Amino acid sequence: MERAEKSSEGKSLFEKVWTLALHRGFVIPTAEIYGGIAGIYDFGPLGTLLVKRLIDLWRRFFIIEETNFPVYEVSGATILPYEVLVASGHVDSFVDPLVACLKCKAKMRADHLVEEKLGVRVEGATVDELNRMIRENGLRCPNCGGELSEVTLFNLMFKTEIGPLGGKAAFLRPETAQVIFIDFKKAFQAMRGKLPFGLAQVGKAYRNEISPRQGLIRLREFTQMEIEVFINPKEVNNHPGIEGGADSKFR
């Protein structure tokens, strides 16, 4: 995300909006009277109304008013068994590069540290490449100036167990897509569906971010609104409405 331009008063538009949201109680740090938890927030009365309004608008536009194909909404569990996240690749690949200060023990995203200190984009850089950039440029802890550890990969999922001690391994879902995929067959049959067929979900997702920041932009618990559209791969170019997005470019 590009840095917001600073105003004449020294505060960016983001900083002004965030300060107002906190002051007016749109957003309340979770367990604030006990010190709070980084990356987790509650919504106050005004914030709750605003979130409800945004979700209602999203539902109306993407589900109710969608005319090219039917879109149905599901509501899935937020705890998923280990096997689901193995199949989706999250157990092995849902990771961020972690580096720690050997002096003050602070932990931070290695890629973010390199980008902030060197002003270069390192998205997709390997652990070896990040270690080399940190070592060659003499990067140190931004908090205390201490020496940094080697970069390691940290899995972002919250792990738990279902049942008593030694029970079945599970995770809090890191995104809403998995429930849509595993429920597709039953939902398709129940609604007597025809392809293309859309399933939508609004719900909580959880990611154990190394360094949550920027207010509500990078959180450990957040709400996702997602749609998966299932099509016949042999008819991918005959998809209704494809003309409207066929030339779109994604990073």
Image (cartoon, helix red, strand yellow):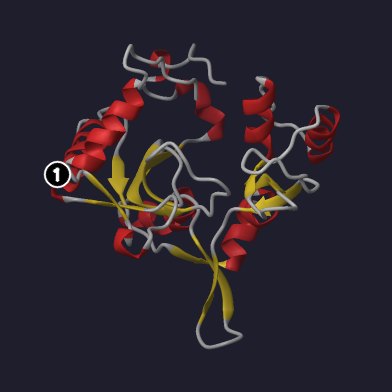
Query: In this rendering, would 180 be left or right of 102?
Result: left
Q: Is mark 1 on a helix, strand or loop?
A: helix
Q: Where residue 40 sits: x, y (%)?
A: 39, 53
As rendered, which of 102 and 175 lies closer to the eye?
102
Report the quarter where the C terminus lies.
top right
As rendered, which of 34 and 86 lies closer to the eye?
34
Residue found 16% across the figure and 39% down from its top: 53
Residue found 70% across the figure and 40% down from its top: 145
Residue found 69% across the figure and 27% down from its top: 122
Outermost residue on the bottom side: it is 164
Q: Where residue 173 sits: x, y (%)?
A: 48, 58
Residue found 30% across the figure and 34% down from its top: 18
Q: How many marks?
A: 1
Residue 126 sits above or below residue 153 on the image = above
Q: Name the residue under label 1.
A: 46
The answer, for residue 16, to whether it is visible in the render is: yes
- Quadrant in the rendering for residue 58: top left
Query: In this rendering, would 83 be left or right of 149?
Result: left
The answer, for residue 194, to whether it is visible in the render is: no
As rendered, which of 23 and 217 lies closer to the eye?
23
| Amino acid on which disc 1 is placed | Leu
Count residues near mark 1 (Cα–Cα under 10 Å), then give few for <14, some for 14-19, many for 20+.
some
